[in-house]
């Protein structure tokens, strides 16, 4: 099963550290469903779970991350 990078964004933890999060879409669903399977990983490879649209949790350390707002052009 191959995953394709479909997005990238920055998220910040409670101490202000910034993480680069990559969003991947699996090319095929493991259960045969029609919905795409989305997964998240840090640029260094650590897995990330999505809680809601702006909140994520690092799997290994359980550190909570908040998605940074995207910069809008002026």
Image (cartoon, rainbow, N blue to C red):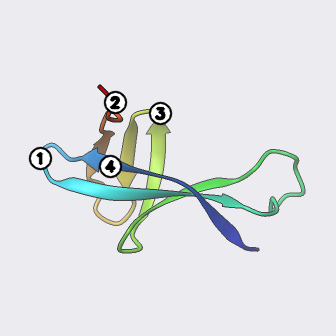
Q: Which mark is residue 74?
A: none
Mark 4 lies on a secondary structure that is strand
Q: How far apart are the alpha carbons under marks 1 and 3?
A: 20 Å
Whether pointer 4 and pointer 1 mark residues with C-beta atoms closer than 8 Å, the reply is: no
Residue 8 in the image, given as x and y percentages of width and height = 45, 53
Mark 3 lies on a secondary structure that is strand
Within 10 Å of disc 3 (Cα), the crowding (few <14, some 14-19, many 20+) is: few
Query: In terms of sequence position, does the residue under pointer 4 or pointer 1 come before the other?
Result: 4
Residue 15's place in the image compared with 21, above or below, is above
Mark 2 lies on a secondary structure that is loop
Residue 33 in the image, given as x and y percentages of width and height = 87, 50
Q: How far apart are the alpha carbons under marks 4 and 1?
A: 12 Å
Pick the quarter of the image with the N terminus: bottom right
Q: How far apart are the alpha carbons under marks 2 and 1?
A: 24 Å
Q: What residue is pinned by disc 3?
A: 52
Residue 53's place in the image compared with 2, above or below, is above
Residue under the image location 47 percent in, 33 percent down: 52
Residue 27 in the image, given as x and y percentages of width and height = 78, 63
Q: How far apart are the alpha carbons under marks 3 and 4?
A: 15 Å
Whether pointer 2 and pointer 3 mark residues with C-beta atoms closer than 8 Å, the reply is: no
Q: What residue is pinned by disc 1?
A: 16
Q: How far apart are the alpha carbons under marks 2 and 3?
A: 26 Å
Query: In terms of sequence position, does the residue under pointer 1 or pointer 3 come before the other?
Result: 1
Q: What residue is pinned by disc 4?
A: 10
Residue under the image location 9 percent in, 47 percent down: 15
Q: What residue is pinned by disc 2?
A: 73
Residue under the image location 84 percent in, 58 percent down: 31
Looking at the image, which is closer to me, 23 or 47?
Answer: 23
Residue 55's place in the image compared with 33, above or below, is above
């Amino acid at each position: 099963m191959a995953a394709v990078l479909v997005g990238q964004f920055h998220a910040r933890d409670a101490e202000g550290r910034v993480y680069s999060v990559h969003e991947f879409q699996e090319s095929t669903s493991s259960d045969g469903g029609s919905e795409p399977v989305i997964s998240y990983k840090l640029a260094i490879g650590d897995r990330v779970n999505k809680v809601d649209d702006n909140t994520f949790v690092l799997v290994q350390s359980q550190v909570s991350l908040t998605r940074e707002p995207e910069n809008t052009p002026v």
